[in-house]
Amino acid sequence: MTTNNVELAVVSTGARSEGWTAEAMALASLAHTIEGYRFASETDAVLARHEGDEGLALFPSVDELIESGVELHALASALNNGLTGEAFADCLRNLDVDTLNGALANFAEAAELHATHPDPVDRAMHLWGECGCCEGNA
Ligand SMILES: [Zn+2]
């Protein structure tokens, strides 16, 4: 947790410490996104800084999520696309990690598709590979 905070501080100040790989930078950025959803309110987040996050955080730390095998990229993407910390915590309690990762990927994919194709007909065309935007990969 402490190491993580140092890494996050480095990222948020834009400073780049020596020896950082692109992978570590990307991971810190994902961790930063995910951390932003760990508490139901700013008050809880502030309290947790003083009292520890036991009983305050909605879901385990990024380090613990990595240990559990949660796909951080899919998680960050789903959170950015409207998944709430509470909903993720529910999934985490009720699904095994493979099912969870699949659900996260689907959630992010569906939300991204909605964002780029707000019209249901466009979405259907896209899924059939008849959409201008996907000529390259259809
Ligand atoms: Zn399309």
Image (cartoon, grey):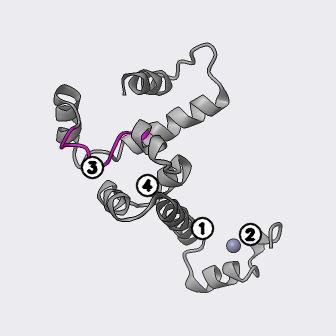
Residue at image mark 2: 133
From mark 3 to mark 2, how far is it between C-alphas? 38 Å
From mark 4 to mark 1, how far is it between C-alphas? 17 Å
Left-right relation of 60 to 32: left
> Which residue is drawn at the image coordinates 57% and 15% (left, top)?
17
Crowdedness near tag 1: few (<14), some (14–19) or many (≥20) residues, C-alpha within 10 Å: few
Left-right relation of 47 to 5: left
Main structural element of the magenta stretch: helix, strand or loop?
loop
Q: Earlier in the sequence, mark 4 or mark 3?
A: 3
Between circles 4 and 3, the one closer to the viewer is 3
Q: Secondary structure at mark 2?
A: helix
Q: Earlier in the sequence, mark 2 or mark 1?
A: 1
Left-right relation of 112 to 39: right
- What residue span does the magenta drawing correspond to? 54-62
Residue at image mark 1: 116
Residue at image mark 4: 79
Between circles 4 and 2, the one closer to the viewer is 4
In magenta segment, residue 61: yes
Task: Determine whether 97 is above or below 12 in the image.
Answer: below
In the picture as drawn, the residue positioned furthest to the top comes out as 18
Query: Which of the 4 image quarters holds residue 57?
Result: top left
Residue at image mark 3: 58
Q: Earlier in the sequence, mark 4 or mark 1?
A: 4
As shown in the figure, which amino acid type bears the numbered disc 3? Leu
